[in-house]
Amino acid sequence: MTACIEACHDYSRIEAEAIEDRLYESNQRTIGRNDGRALGFVMRDVEGRIVGAAMGYSWAGTSEIRQMWVDEAYRGRGHARDLLSAFVKESKTRGVQRIWVTSHDFQAPALYEKSGFRRVAEFRDWPEGHSKIVLCLTLSAGAPTPQVLGMS
């Protein structure tokens, strides 16, 4: 079987979602868990426009927050905390043991840490002059503490 590689820098959301679906199918076959579901909450203004969101998924006892955002005009009022709380509450309902999130140092790592997330990794100079931070919230008392290779 032959195949060729071609540049595809302007792929569509539909193409990206199709690849995500194929990755999920492969992953669920490998570990035998087919319980992946979207998990998200949005906040709308009086006109119905989205002004805040916490979106991700749950799968195999884990959740990941993929997008967390509040419009600048709505910041500083506790909306991000409320969205995060809703995400955590639904994760618990689904039997999730831990929630993962990444945040750049100029985004909201302090919000997550104030909410009980523990910083488990930091990648300096991503982007240059800043850091990308990986955080984890352990929800169940019996869940082992997450370990990252090279960290204790």
Image: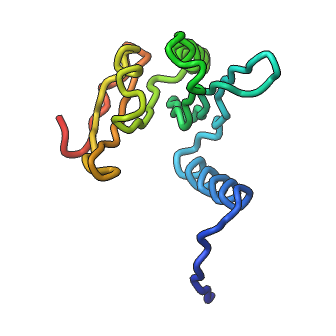
Spot the residue most to the bottom.
2
Indicate the quadrant containing the N terminus: top left, top right, bottom left or bottom right: bottom right
Q: In the rendered image of this protein, does residue 79 appear above or below residue 31?
A: above
Residue 92 visible to the viewer: no
The quarter holding residue 74 reads top right
Of residues 21 and 81, the one nearer the viewer is 81
* Residue 28 position within the rendered picture, expressed as x and y whole percent measured from the top left: 59, 47
What residue do we see at 67% from left, 34% from top?
37
Q: Left or right: where does residue 61 sit relative to residue 111?
A: right
* Residue 73 position within the rendered picture, expressed as x and y whole percent measured from the top left: 60, 21
What residue do we see at 59% from left, 40% from top?
33
* Residue 76 position within the rendered picture, expressed as x and y whole percent measured from the top left: 50, 14
What residue do we see at 51% from left, 34% from top?
64
What residue do we see at 82% from left, 21% from top?
47
Indicate the quadrant containing the C terminus: top left, top right, bottom left or bottom right: top left
The quarter holding residue 91 reads top right
* Residue 139 position within the rendered picture, expressed as x and y whole percent measured from the top left: 43, 17
Q: In the rendered image of this protein, does residue 123 appear above or below residue 79?
A: below
Q: Left or right: where does residue 152 sit relative to residue 7?
A: left
Q: In the rendered image of this protein, does residue 112 appear above or below residue 102?
A: above
